[in-house]
Amino acid sequence: MVTITIHGEQKQVEQGTTYEAIAAEYQKEYDGTIALVSANGKIRELFKKVTRDCTIEFFTLKDSVGHKSYLRAAKMLFLKGLNDVFGEEAARKSCVEFSIGRGLYVNACGTVEATARNAERIKDRMRQLVEAKTPFMKKSYSLDDAIELFRKKGMEDKVKLFRFRMGSTVNVYEIEGYYDYYYGYMLPDAGYIKWFDVLPYEEGFMLVLPSESNPTVMEPFVESRKLFDTMENAKKWGRTAGIETVGDLNEQICRGSVSDLILVQEAKQERIIGEIAKDIASEGNVKFVMIAGPSSSGKTSFSHRLSIQLRTLGKVPHPIALDNYFVNREQTPRDEKGDYNFECLEAIDVKLFNENMVSLLAGERVEMPSFNFKTGQREYRGDFLQLKEDDILVIEGIHGLNEKMSYALPEESKYKIYISALTTLNIDAHNRIPTTDGRLLRRMVRDARTRGSSAQRTIQMWPSVRRGEEENIFPFQEEADAMFNSALVYELAMLKTFAEPLLFQIPKGDPEYYEAKRLLKFLDYFLGVPSESLPGNSICREFVGGSCFNV
C-alpha cells in the first residue's frame, strides 16, 4: 500500500493503482473532466500507476495543460482515422499546418480528396474508436530504436528531428497499431474525446475542437479567409525555402547558412511592407493607417518600417499611439477580479480620438495628447499637428480595426492593417507550433529586457492578455485591408538563447512552473542562433534588443 494526499487528506491505495482510477473517485468534485494529475509536482498521465507515496493535484480540460492534452489526443485520433480509412500513406504525408479559430487545418498533401463524404468517413472511424474507448499506449524507445521505427514507417521528418535530440530516449504513442510521436501529455483513451468535428477544407480537412473555456461545447467553425491565405502563403514560402520543420532549420544552422536565411526572409518582409505602402499610396484618399494586432506582434517595428516605405513614395507619415488616448486612471474600467482592464475599448477616450482625427482631416491644428503611465493621467506637452496634402497618420493600437474606434472617420480615409506573428514552422509534420507560443516567448524576452519583468510574471499575465485579444482583436482581423505576418522562420532558434535562462528561474512548485517546463522542452528541439547577424531594423530586434528604432 502507498499513501496519497489529496486536498490535504491522506488515504491508502494499492501500489500499482492507476491515476485514472483515483481521478474517478474525485471527478464529481470537479466541473471539468479530469485529464491529468500532478504527483509531487510532476505531471503524470492518467494511465500511469502510483508507485510511491505522493501528493496529488488534478488538471481538468478547463486547465491549459489539460486542454492541450485534449487537442493532442484528438489530433492523433484524427490521424488514426485517416490511416484506417485511407491508408498509412495518407496519415504519413498529411501535415497539421496551423489553427484557424477553433479549427486545426490538416493538409492532406494530395493523398485524399477533400470532400464532405471523405470527412464523414474519417469522423465515423473516429467515433468508433471513441465508443470503444480505444487506449493510447505510451512506450519509451531508445533514441536509435525510435529513429529506426520511424524510418521504417517513412516518417523522415521525425528521423531528422531526432537527429538533433540530446536525450537518449523517445516516448512514442500508439493507438491500435498506429504509431506517432507527440511532445506533451496524452489522454488515457479515445473515450475522452467526445467533442470534435471534421470538415473538408481546401486541400485537406479542418479538425474542429472546443475551446479551453468551454471544453464541452462545440462552437460552429468560423472561416477566416484572409488569415488562412496569409498563413498558407507563409507555409508555401517555407516549402520553397526547404524549411518546413525544426529538423530542416537545424540542418540549415549546422551548414552555417543561417545568415543567408536571415537576409532572405528579412528581404521578403521588406518587399511585402513596400507592397502595402504602394497600396496605401495608390488609394489617394487615405489619411489614417490603422494598425492592430495581438501582443508581441511587432507592431511598433512594423509601423516604423512602413513609415519609411511611405516616405520613399513621397508621403509624410506621423506615428500616433492609441495608448495616448487612454482615459485617466480613475476612469479606467475594472475586470471581474477588480483589476484595471486596459484591453477593453472603454479604456480609450474614443470620443476625443474621433474629435481630434476629424479636426485633423479638416486641416485644423490640433494639440495631441500624451499619456503619462506613471501618474495614470493624460497630459498636453505642446505637441501640435496639422495635416498637409501628403501627410498620413500611422495609428497603432489594439482597437485599430474596430469600427467603433474610428466611427467618425470616412471609410475611404482609412486603411486597416492586421499584423501578427503567424508561425507556420512545424516541429514535424504532425506537431505544429502554436502562434501563441512564439508571441509568449517574444514578450517574455522583451519584458525581461525592457521592464525587468520575470518570465514567471509574463506567464502569469498571459491568460489575461489572451482573453483581451480574443475579445478585442481577433473578431475584427478579417476587416483588415492587408495582413502582415511578422513571424520569422529562424526566430525561435534565436529567442531560445534569451528565453531559456529566464524560464529556468521559475521555481518548482509555483503555478507557472508547468508552463515553464513545457516551453523549455519545446525550445530543446532547436539549435541556438546568435543575434549578431540580425539586421538593426528586424522585427525580432524589438524583442532581443539592438533595434535601430525606438521600440
Image: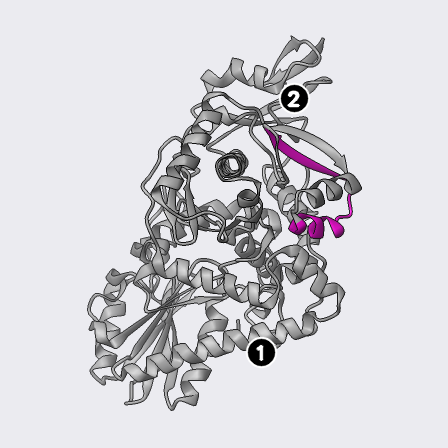
Image quarter (top left, top right, bottom left or bottom right) of the N terminus:
top right
Residue 289 place in picture, x, y as percent? 34, 74
Give 450 or 332, whichever is nearer the viewer. 450
> In terms of depth relative to the viewer, which is nearer, 165 or 296?
165
Identify the residue at image location x=55%, y=77%: 267
Question: What residue did someone put label 2 on?
Answer: 55
- Residue 198 at what x, y percent from top left? 39, 40
Tell me the residue at 33%/76% (across/down).
368
Residue 49 vertical position relative to residue 303 in the rendered view, above or below: above
The amino acid type, in three-letter code, at marker 1 is: Cys
Report x, y in % for residue 303.
44, 74
Looking at the image, how many numbered discs can be counted on the residues? 2
Q: Tell me the magenta residue range.
A: 156-175
Is 211 placed above or below 351 here?
above
Q: Is residue 340 visible to the viewer in this orientation of the structure?
A: no
Q: Nearer the viewer, residue 214 or 98?
A: 98
Q: Earlier in the sequence, mark 2 or mark 1?
A: 2
- Answer few, some or many: residues within 10 Å of disc 1's Cα (few below 14, many 20 plus, some between 14 and 19): some
Query: Residue at 38% across / 54% down in the picture?
Result: 343
Above or below, comparing residue 440 to residue 219 in the picture: below
